[in-house]
Amino acid sequence: MNDDFLLLNPGPVPVAPEVREAMAEPMVSHRSADFEAVYERAQDGLDYVFEHSTPDGEATAGSGTSLICNGTATMAMEAAVANLVDDDSEVVALVNGKFGRRFARIADRHARCTRVEADWGDSLDLDAVREAVDDDTDVVTMVHNETSTGLLNPVPEVGEIAADHDARFVVDGVTSIGGDEFRIDDWGVDVAVTDAQKALAAPPGVSALYATRDAAEAFDGESAPFYEDLEWHLRKAESHQTPFTSAVPLFRALAAAVERIREEGMPDRIARHRRQSAAFRAGFGALGLERFPDPEGPTELSNTLTAIALPETVREDPDAFFDAVAERNVSISGGQAHLGGEIFRVSNMGELADERLLRGVRTVGAALADVGVDADPEAGVAAAREEL
Ligand code: PLP
C-alpha cells in the first residue's frame, strides 16, 4: 500500500493522517480520565454532526444524546431496534436494498416484522407504507442512503407516516450522516444510526447512534442483547465511558475525525459531497455509462455514492474490468448480492480531493477501454471537472 493507492469503496473510506496517527498513541485504560476526555471529544463532535447536518448549519435536533458503540453499524442498528421492542411488538421495515433488508432481518429476531418491499434500486412506494403502518405499529425502520444501490430514500415523508401512528422511527443514516443533510427533529426521527468508517471518515470498528430524549426514555435495555443494553450505555455515557472495554484507538480516531468535520462545518461538507457526486455522475455519463436505475418516485440519487450499470459486454466478464481498475491502484466496489457483476459503486464520502475523484473517473474510463468498451477517459474527466 502506498500514497498512490486510491480507495473509492463506499466504506471504509480514506482517513486523514491525523486520524491515523491518533490510533498510534500509547494505550490507556478505558476507565481512565484520559479515555473519558477522548469519549467526550468524540461525543461532542457527534452531537454537532447529528444536530447540525443542514445546508445552512441550523440546528435540527437538540434534546438527544449521541452514543458510541463498540461495533460496526449493524450493532447500532440492532441496538436501536432491540431496545424499543419486545417479542409482541410490530415493526414495519422498508426494504429496497441490502441494508433495508438487514433491518428487517434484525427486526425478525426481536419482534414481529412486516416488510414493505420494492426491487433493489426502485423507489419506495409511500402508499404501500401508509397501508402497512397503523396504530399497532411500534417501530418503523428505514435506510436513508441505501449503499447497495446508491439511492436516497424519503425519510421526511415516512417520518410523517410514523408520527401519525405514534410509531418510533429508526433510521439508518450510515452513508449519509456526516456527508449529507439529515434532520432529526424535522423528519421525526427517534433514533439515527451512523458508522465511523463512512461519511465521518474514521476507521471501521465503531458506530454511533443518536437517541432523542423521548426515544431514550422508551428504551428497555432488558429486552436487548446484553452487549447492546442502551439504558446501560446511556448511564455509562454520563461519565464518558462505555459499559464494556472500549476500542480505545478507534475512539481516539473517531474523536479526531469528528473534530475535522466541525472545522469544515456541515454546510460546506454537504455542498462538497453534492458537488462531487454530481461530478461522478457527469463523468461516468460522458464515458457512455448508465446509472444503475434512475428511480422514479420519492427516492432520489445519493449524494455520497454513485452506482453505475456495467455495460452488457462487461457483464460477460466483470472480473476483467475490476482487475483493470485494480491494476491502476484504485479500489472500487461491485454490486452486492444479486447485483454482483451488474453494477459498480464508488464513494465520495469523507474527504476525497477533487483531483482524486478525477483520477477515479479516468481510471474507470481506461479500464473500460482495456476490456473493449468504446470509452474516452478524458471526455469523462472533462465532464466531471465541469461539475467541480
Ligand atoms: N447500513 C448501511 C447503509 C451500510 O452501508 C452498511 C455497511 O456498508 C451497514 C449498515 C452495516 O455496516 P457493517 O456491515 O459494517 O456493520
Image (cartoon, rainbow, N blue to C red):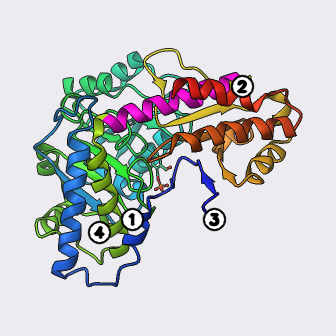
Give, as a single range, the part of the protein colored magenta.
Answer: 268-286
Mark 3 or mark 4, which is nearer the start of the sequence? Answer: 3
Instruction: Categorize mark 1 by other alpha carbons within 10 Å: few (<14), some (14-19), many (20+).
Output: few
Residue occupying image coordinates x 16% and y 68%: 240
Is the CB of the residue bearing disc 4 within 8 angstroms of ligand 1? no
What number is the disc on residue 379? Answer: 2
Task: Indicate the secondary structure of the residue bearing disc 3.
Answer: loop
Q: Amino acid at mark 2?
A: Ala
- Vertical placement of residue 317 versus 150, above or below: below
Residue 255: x percent and y percent?
29, 62
Q: Amino acid at mark 3?
A: Asn
Task: Indicate the secondary structure of the residue bearing disc 1.
Answer: helix
Instruction: Categorize mark 4 by other alpha carbons within 10 Å: few (<14), some (14-19), many (20+).
Output: few
Instruction: Categorize mark 2 by other alpha carbons within 10 Å: few (<14), some (14-19), many (20+).
Output: some
The residue pinned by badge 1 equals: 18
For discs 4 and 1, the disc positioned in front in the rendered view: 1
Q: Amino acid at mark 4?
A: Phe
Task: Indicate the secondary structure of the residue bearing disc 2.
Answer: helix
Residue occupying image coordinates x 29% and y 69%: 226
What number is the disc on residue 226? Answer: 4
Q: Is residue 270 magenta?
A: yes
The residue closer to the viewer here, 116 or 238, is 238
What number is the disc on residue 95? Answer: none
Q: Is residue 357 magenta?
A: no
- Vertical placement of residue 153 versus 319, above or below: above
**In the visual, does 370 lie left or right of 326?**
right
**In the visual, does 216 lie left or right of 123?**
left
Alpha carbon distance from label 4 to label 3? 41 Å
Type of secondary structure dominating the magenta stretch? helix
